[in-house]
Image: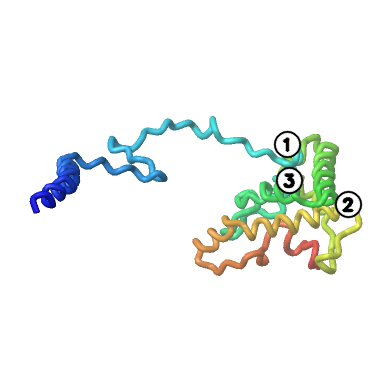
Amino acid sequence: MKRRGFVRGLILAPAAQAALSAQQAPAPAPAAPPDRPMRNMQGPAKLKVTGADLTAETTQLYFSKDQFAALEKLASVLMPPMKGNPGALEAQAPLFLDFLIRVSPSDRQMLYKDGLDNLNAQAKKKFSKSFAQLDATQAGTIIKPLMVTRPWTVDWPDDPMQKFIAEAHEDVRKATTNSREWAEAAAKSGRRFNRGGQTTGFYWKPIDPVVGD
């Protein structure tokens, strides 16, 4: 019996010693989750602020400087602000059209480029100015003869300049009436927002290239 108790003591002694050591040893610090960085307990990090003018890139236009200026003047004459509605410039329609024509087929790109160049050429011939430098009355003397009656919206004129003015007129109207600025103006005024709806505008009524007299 003594022998059996002695052997039993030899077996249990190491286990007891290991358990005692485990109780006395300090618990290890929990490891941080591998996918989560440790928080900075000293407060939020201070970020170095850089001026927007040093980091923002200037928008690269598809049209040349003179072409885009002519497009802005054309849009402002075709769709000025009226009755609380934003005009084409306030709705940034020229910028949208610059993007639209950039991704359009090549024949439409050439229609716009040639049309804008022609407006500048006519303005310099008649007034010794670029089209963008003309006032509304001067610009009207160039635009009005190019606006023709179309019995149907898909019936584009055969004359390249008349076709350009007709397409630009429709594009400017759609870009303006479908803009965020147009919707916000409608919401502020409390009137029902009609996306792409009819609105009285300069050279739109009664001289509409689609409806006619």
Which coloring applies here? rainbow
The crowding category of the residue bearing disc 1, from other C-alpha atoms within 10 Å (few below 14, some 14 to 19, many at least 20), is few
Residue 100 placed where, x, y %?
A: 72, 51
Q: What residue type is labelled 3?
A: Leu
Of the numbered discs 1 and 2, the one sitting upstream in the chain is 1
Q: In this view, does 172 lie above or below 21?
A: below
Quadrant in which the N terminus appears? bottom left
* Residue in the image at 85% along x and 54% along y: 162
Residue 34 placed where, x, y %?
A: 40, 44
Mark 1 touches mark 2? (CB < 8 Å): no
Determine which residue is flagged by label 3: 71
Distance from disc 1 to disc 2, alpha carbons, whole Å, reads: 22 Å
Question: Quick check: 176 left or right of 116?
Answer: left
Q: Check disc 1 and report its element: helix, strand or loop.
A: helix
Q: What residue type is labelled 1?
A: Lys
Of the numbered discs 1 and 3, the one sitting upstream in the chain is 1
The circle drawn on residue 65 is 1
Q: Check disc 2 and report its element: helix, strand or loop.
A: helix
Residue 175 placed where, x, y %?
A: 67, 56
Q: Check disc 3 and report its element: helix, strand or loop.
A: helix
Q: Which of 133 and 26 is in front in this view?
A: 26
Distance from disc 1 to disc 3, alpha carbons, whole Å, reads: 10 Å
In the rendered image, the residue lying farthest to the right is 158
